[in-house]
Image (cartoon, rainbow, N blue to C red):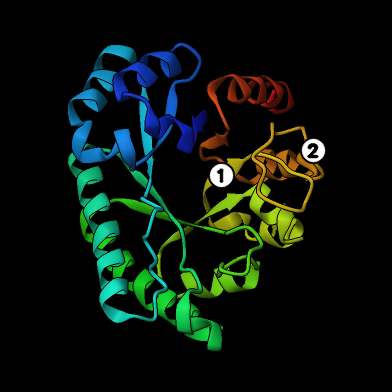
Amino acid sequence: MIGIGSPAFCVSPFMNTLEQISERFELWEILSEGEDRLELIRDGIKYGRESLGMRFQVHAPLSDVNIGSVHEPMRIAAVNEIKQTVLMCRQLEIPLVTVHPGFVQGIAFLNRHHALERTKQSIKEIASFAMDQSVSIAVENLPANINATCTQAAELLEVVEGTDLGICFDMGHANTAGQLDEMLALVDRFRNVHLHNNEGEWDQHNKVDDGSADLGKVVSVLKRSYKGNIIIEATDLDSGSESKRVLEKMLA
């Protein structure tokens, strides 16, 4: 199923956004921030599911949440934030949560490997908790950035290795890192997919066919080897709808 997600939705009242999305999509990946924090929208999710026929999955909070923090109190706080999101998803019968790996901040720049090691530790803790809650986790590859871990396929695989967690393949992020082929080679571990495009320089979130990422190659691999949902990460609902029309033709 093709769904939509956008940080832009978080600044508008949930019910207004829900009604608008439901006219064009049946699946919404909710970013649990701002107006869309899960603890604020329980009744809205129930209404969307029961009255509008909507399906939901969740992107865990991003703002100030760093599971790779080398400052242990902050790492623990970030892990607890993810665990709380997982717990709410179990209660709301939402089956999948996408999680960002850690970031390099502060003294971690003196040895970037420490941020990766903290990320691996956090992921193991999250994996154990999510298994107990029967909620699936997909860890997302990040765009090329001085602060990011897991921009490379090998590093992302290292983080999830030894757990039952899957990967959220993000086409736009992979394109900025020159890792499209390497990420697609991990398709057997994909549990979620984010599609958007860019020119390879920064994370623009263009329409799926507007950029240098080889959408045809990506769709070919997904059609052959992936059975899960595809989330269009858009700047707004209109551009997301245009991307949906492109994808529907290619997936037919």
Q: Is residue 203 above or below residue 5?
A: below
| Residue in the image at 39% along x and 75% along y | 69
Q: CA distance from mark 1 to mark 2?
A: 15 Å
Displayed quadrant of residue 213: top right
Above/below status of 122 relative to 13: below
The residue carrying mark 2 is 216
Q: How many marks?
A: 2
* Amino acid found under the numbered disc labelled 2: Gly
- The amino acid beneath tag 1 is Val
In-image side of 30 versus 186 (left or right): left
Where 38 sits versus 111, above or below? above
Q: Is residue 109 visible?
A: yes
Which type of secondary structure does the marked residue at label 1 adopt?
A: strand
Q: Earlier in the sequence, mark 1 or mark 2?
A: 1
- The numbered dot on residue 61 is none
Q: Position of residue 147 (x, y in %)?
A: 56, 68
Residue 194 sits above or below residue 160 on the image: above
Give the x, y percent position of residue 222: 66, 42
Of the 4 image quadrants, the one containing the C terminus is top right
Q: Is residue 111 visible?
A: no
Secondary structure, mark 2, is helix
Front-most of residues 83 and 61: 61
The x, y position of residue 105, in whole percent, is 48, 74
Label 2 neighbour load within 10 Å: few <14, some 14-19, many 20+: few
Q: Is residue 162 left or right of residue 183?
A: left
Q: Residue at x 25, y 67 (%)?
A: 77
Structural crowding at the residue carrying mark 1, measured as other residues with C-alpha within 10 Å and reported as few (<14), some (14–19) or many (≥20): many
Q: Give the quadrant of residue 195.
A: top right
**Residue visible at 65% across and 68% down?**
152
Q: Which residue is denoted by mark 1 in the rendering?
A: 193
Residue at the farthest front position: 106
Q: Position of residue 111 (x, y in %)?
A: 54, 88
